[in-house]
Image (cartoon, rainbow, N blue to C red):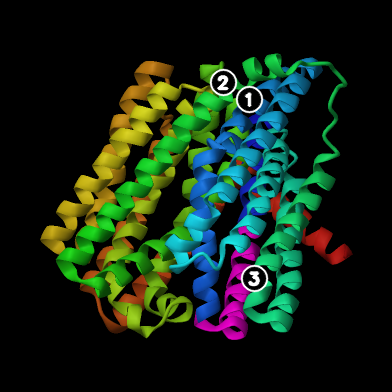
Amino acid sequence: MNQEQQSSYRRIFKATGLFGGVQVITILISMIRSKFVAVLLGSQGVGILSLFNSPLGLITSLTGFGINYSAIRNISEAAGTDDQIKIARTIISFRRFVVLTGLIGMLVTILLAPWLSKWSFGDSSYSWAFIWLSITLLINAVSGGQKALLQGMRKLQSMAKATVIGSFLGLFTSIPLYYIYGIKGIVPSVIISACVALLLSWYFSKEVPIAKINISYKESVKEGMGFVKLGIILSISAQIGGLVKYIIITFISNTGGIEQVGLYTAGISFMGTYVGLVFTAMSTDYYPKLAAVCKDNLAIKTMVNQQAQISVLIILPIVIFLLSSMPLVIKVFLSEKFLGIIPFVNLTVLGVIIQAVSYSVGYISFAKGDSKFFFWMEGIFSNILNLVLYIIGYKFFGLLGIGYAFIALYIIYLLILYAFTHKRYEFSFDKDLYKIVFISLSISLLAYFSIQYLSAYSLYFMLIILLISSILYSYKELNMRMDLKSVITLYIKKLLRR
């Protein structure tokens, strides 16, 4: 393996490690904040906070048009050209659109404040609270835009610092307000946390050099229509996905009862939080990097295969660990009341390896700005497939059927996605990826069937062997691609110097 390939694998691994750590920290801070809110504000305060966040989140989604995410592609593509004028035009246009969408969100919230109060709380007594909170839609839009700029320009360490420091400061500014003012401290706490995030994102985004140019608002509109169009498609797809999730929950409630909804939600949330953080971490660097070479199909093929290989190799030991210790993990992160979700969560864990590959391939159309293909594939096909499989799975097998449906969903989705991306973008998997996926699935299936058919000491022995095997295999393959041993040695030396 040549030096360039080795360097590419290292960048992927480091970025995933960096933002995996960031995700863990933000999850822990979120858990601490939730605990303080529960203790200091009680169930009433938790309910009020939720009744503020839900409608404001919906308005943000509808008026933001998804441009904070879609524009990352345009910024990355511009940065890839190294044309300072093009980069400046893209960034200035993006910032103007961000302010515009933030103002629209703020004005919509102000106009709807009396109705939002009545819909959420039954009367208009919280109208002024919504009016005050409307400013956070503008603030969050601008700070989100600054973070998108950092991500698009691949200033990953600055983005990570802004996220972690913002989470800590948000925690330490909100707790005193809750302690002193109780429920009355909710609104100022939300506003101050938003301001802290804005200041940090502004501070770190200053390091991005922008050429001084004159660009009219008319030119900005023309420049920005690409990411606005893609952003709207992304927003519509997200709304369809939200509707599908609601239909599934409603079906489970009507078929199996509210308790089944609680178990289903806990299982899906568990997977999204503790396995999904790997996907969130990898997308932070992967998406802008892919967008930067969006016109080069050969470069995309290489990058997607590398990303898929690294993702599977990182996830494999996590999958075996979760399968081996699921009862303990459920008790620690949830409670004994949720042990009933283990059979269906084990199945979803099994499907994560296929999900990792499909996740890597799924970014191609979005990175290329192919909005039509993205909408029909992600917005329509995957959501309809999700709805049909989950309903059929639950109807015939209960929660276990959700696990079967999860695996079937990603197998069918990957096969269809691969067929279209192969034809449309000349994309194909390489032999190394096939080998890694085959071995990873074999180890995972051995662990799963051991849990089903072995017991007592033979089960523990087999799971320990498989966990060690998964770690050794992932280490061997990663070391072959990026000299992982030297990366770890260098990291340990840095820690010792501190």
Please, is residue 398 above or below residue 213 in the view?
Answer: below
Tell me which secondary structure the magenta stretch mostly adopts.
helix
Residue found at x 52% / y 22%:
368
Residue highlighted by disc 2: 226
The answer to which of marks 3 and 2 sits earlier in the sequence is: 3
Residue highlighted by disc 1: 74
Q: Amino acid at mark 1?
A: Asn
Q: Amino acid at mark 3?
A: Ile
For the residues labelled 2 and 1, the Cα–Cα distance comes to: 8 Å
Residue highlighted by disc 3: 186
Q: Amino acid at mark 2?
A: Gly
Secondary structure, mark 3, is helix
Residue found at x 36% / y 35%:
379
Of 479 and 324, nearer the camera is 324
2 and 1 marks in contact (CB < 8 Å): yes
Secondary structure, mark 2, is helix
Q: Nearer the viewer, mark 1 or mark 3?
A: 3
